[in-house]
Amino acid sequence: MKRAILKVFPSQLGLLFKKSKNIKMIESGLPKDAKFLGCNYSWERQTFFLVYESKEFVEVKEGEMLPVLPNTTLQVYEMKGDLNER
């Protein structure tokens, strides 16, 4: 089983869904073959824990803790002009 956990903070989600003309890109993230398996939210840590599976992750035996991936970086780029013009 090659699975890992990605921590996502609510403030990151807020940026993704905020209406704007800016372009939002994930600078560091998941492998292209990553498959979403599930999600859990911790009130104590104010964090979403997303579980993914990928051939690139380290093999984890049943019952072992899943590794936590490095934090993702969300970059926002200011858009020049109108998106409808492109």
Image (cartoon, rainbow, N blue to C red):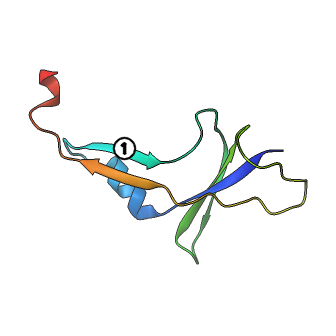
The residue depicted at 56 percent of the width and 75 percent of the height is: 45
- Residue 41 location (% of width, % of height): 60, 63
Quadrant position of residue 86: top left
Left or right of residue 27, residue 54 in this image: right
Q: Residue 53 at x, y = what percent?
A: 71, 42
Which amino acid type is marked by label 1? Met
Residue lying furthest right in this view? 62
Identity of the residue drawn at 52% across and 47% down: 29
Residue 6 location (% of width, % of height): 60, 55
Q: Could you say which is closer to the camera, residue 8 or residue 59?
A: 59
**Observer-nearest residue: 24 or 49?**
24
Report the residue marked by disc 1.
25
Left or right of residue 41, residue 26 in this image: left
Residue at image point 64% right, 38% down = 34
Horizontal side of residue 29 vs 61, given as left or right = left
In x, y percent, where is residue 82? 11, 31
Q: Is residue 63 above or below residue 26?
A: below
Outermost residue, top direction? 86
